[in-house]
Image (spheres, rainbow, N blue to C red):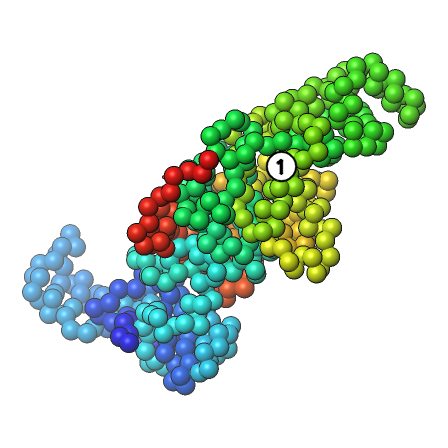
């Protein structure tokens, strides 16, 4: 196989490396290169800086060249200057950091030693299979990016390792977050080994995901409207717990107290009775049971929120609802899309809380044996700071429970946000896989740098300059954070499915 020669090593100390770049070659910031060791081993390095050196670099040399210029610093005699500058007097030195090391048996290891003087430096190629299989994953997201080009080397994540360790997707509006979610969903559909629950706050995924060739078998859509496609969400009264209500609006202490008292008094029927009975009867009933006399405005507010939810989420008395169906679909490794755009913020929060809680309780209630029969599920939560922000992150919130407990039960959270700094530190520190897209604000970038388990300081410049659809993937099992050009969803399908024609939406 042809190797693309890039230069030769001229200096190494610990994990830092310098190499002289071959005269006709380009090396860019962020390029991942290979140093061929002398013992059939290899060193993977990332270029992070450059310097130019010449035999004229010394003070005397510079002074001599300056004397050839006129008083305005302009060249007097180009030919003469070319004569001095010509030949191999000038070199460009690349400065790099060793990322990992492959021994002669092809085993990938953290840096163990440094390469020898004048070893050859080359571009990555298909021979680098140990490295490529580590970054490839089973859920493909994009191609490895080199400084100015894209290599046809797939990058993705291993779902089995990363889903239960939680994922964060961060980027400013327009940086390509939704596209990443689509590509991830498409890879999940291809794989069939994981469930994916997407809370789609902008109703932006159905059109694209339903064009996936396997969407009929593997994509399920729910909404609260009467649409041509998908199913309408229906909830049973007994499925709505007090925490679903308290999660969706701000309540005063007496209101919270009343909600919990109602639920302990009437159990599964609490919401139905709260709607059915007059405020006055409810107050009497509560007074009889608990000795507490609640204000009629307190009860009024609770009744009003319950009424709104009943309307929006179609809360009914019928036994069979779609909730258990959704959970079964997720257990089977399907992608479940819940469209929330047309629901009020209150309804949206109640529904996402309720569904996530049911999923958590369902997975938590299973034995190890039972759990091994069902697929791990990833829950995608957009604009996550609304649920997992610094203030919202209380232990009673189902999403913070998911972040801290879910991995035991084979569940994981995928937190999508344009302002990671708004998320609680406790949440950020639990995200073991980060997809870092372009972040315009320095405060957000600094937050990510501070919270990321991988040392990404070396890539600070790269992160600052990420274009739309470009990202850095840092995950705990990969030895380094990889620069990625995310596939554009449509192109990804075309590339995967030769002769691909979008399928009409499912009805
Ligand atoms: N990897 C990519 N390659 C090419 N274009 C992309 C890529 N990711 C996103 N885009 C384009 O950029 C625009 C914004 O992307 P989107 O995913 O909606 O961003 P966000 O959700 O972060 O606001 C879209 O028009 C999309 O087609
Ligand atoms: Mg978006």
| Image quarter (top left, top right, bottom left or bottom right) of the N terminus | bottom left
In terms of image quadrants, where is residue 73? bottom left
**Residue 17 seen from this side:** no
Residue at figure coordinates x 15%, y 52% from the top left? 72
Q: Count neighbours of disc 1 (C-alpha within 10 A) and say few if under 14, some if 14 to 19, many if 20 or more.
A: some
**Camera-side residue of 313 and 44:** 313
Residue at figure coordinates x 50%, y 48% from the top left? 218
At which x and y percent is residue 221? 52, 38
Q: Residue furthest bottom?
A: 39
Residue at figure coordinates x 50%, y 74% from the top left? 109
Question: SS of the residue at dot 1?
Answer: helix
At which x and y percent is residue 397? 69, 39
Q: How many marks?
A: 1
Query: Which residue position holds label 1?
Result: 322
In terms of image quadrants, where is residue 301? top right
**Camera-side residue of 279 and 457:** 279
**Camera-side residue of 412 and 363:** 363
At which x and y percent is residue 495? 33, 54
Question: Height in image: 147 above or below 346?
Answer: below
Specify whether 298 is left or right of 434.
right
The answer to whether mark 1 is within 8 Å of ligand 2 is: no
At which x and y percent is residue 445? 49, 47
**Residue 39 seen from this side:** yes
Residue at figure coordinates x 32%, y 54% from the top left? 498
Specify whether 255 is left or right of 494.
right
């Amino acid at each position: 196989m042809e190797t693309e020669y890039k230069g030769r090593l001229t200096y190494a100390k610990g994990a830092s490396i310098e190499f002289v770049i071959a005269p006709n070659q380009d090396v860019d910031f962020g390029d991942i290169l290979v140093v061929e060791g002398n013992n059939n081993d290899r060193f993977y390095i990332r270029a992070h800086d450059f310097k130019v050196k010449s035999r004229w670099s010394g003070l005397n040399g510079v002074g001599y060249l300056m004397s050839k210029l006129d008083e305005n610093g302009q060249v007097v005699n180009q030919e003469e200057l070319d004569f001095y500058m010509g030949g191999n007097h000038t070199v460009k030195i690349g400065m790099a950091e060793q990322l990992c090391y492959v021994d002669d048996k092809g085993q990938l290891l953290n840096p163990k030693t440094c390469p020898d003087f004048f070893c050859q430096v080359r571009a990555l190629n298909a021979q680098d299979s140990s490295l490529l299989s580590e970054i490839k994953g089973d859920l493909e997201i994009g191609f490895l990016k080199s400084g100015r080009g894209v290599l046809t080397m797939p990058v993705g994540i291993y779902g089995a390792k990363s889903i239960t360790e939680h994922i964060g997707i961060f980027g400013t509006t327009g940086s390509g977050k939704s596209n990443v979610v689509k590509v991830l969903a498409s890879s999940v559909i291809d794989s069939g080994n994981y469930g994916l629950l997407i809370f789609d706050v902008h109703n932006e995924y159905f059109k694209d995901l339903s064009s996936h060739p396997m969407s009929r078998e593997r994509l399920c859509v729910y909404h609260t409207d009467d649409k041509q496609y998908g199913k309408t969400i229906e909830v049973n009264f007994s499925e709505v717990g007090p925490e679903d209500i308290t999660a969706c609006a701000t309540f005063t202490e007496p209101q919270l107290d009343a909600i919990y008292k109602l639920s302990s008094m009437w159990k599964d029927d609490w919401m139905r009775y709260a709607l059915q009975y007059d405020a006055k009867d409810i107050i009497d009933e509560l007074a009889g049971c608990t000795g507490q006399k609640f204000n009629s405005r307190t009860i009024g507010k609770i009744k009003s929120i319950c009424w709104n939810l009943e309307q929006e989420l179609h809360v009914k008395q019928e036994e069979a609802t779609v909730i258990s169906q959704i959970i079964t679909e997720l257990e089977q490794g399907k992608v479940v899309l819940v469209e929330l755009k047309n629901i009020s913020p209150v309804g949206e929060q109640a529904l996402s809380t309720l569904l996530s809680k049911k999923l958590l309780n369902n997975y938590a209630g299973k034995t190890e044996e039972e759990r091994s029969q069902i697929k791990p599920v990833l829950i995608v939560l957009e604009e996550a700071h609304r649920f997992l922000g610094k203030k919202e992150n209380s232990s009673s919130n189902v999403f913070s429970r998911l972040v801290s407990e879910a991995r035991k039960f084979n569940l994981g959270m995928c937190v999508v946000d344009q302002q990671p700094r708004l998320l609680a530190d406790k949440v950020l520190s639990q995200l073991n896989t980060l997809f870092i897209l372009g972040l315009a604000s320095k405060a957000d970038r600094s937050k990510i740098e501070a919270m990321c388990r991988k040392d990404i300081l070396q890539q600070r410049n790269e992160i600052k300059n990420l274009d739309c659809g470009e990202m850095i993937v840092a995950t705990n099992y990969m030895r380094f954070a990889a620069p990625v050009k995310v596939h554009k969803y449509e192109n990804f399908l075309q590339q995967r499915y030769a002769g691909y024609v979008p399928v009409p939406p499912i009805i």
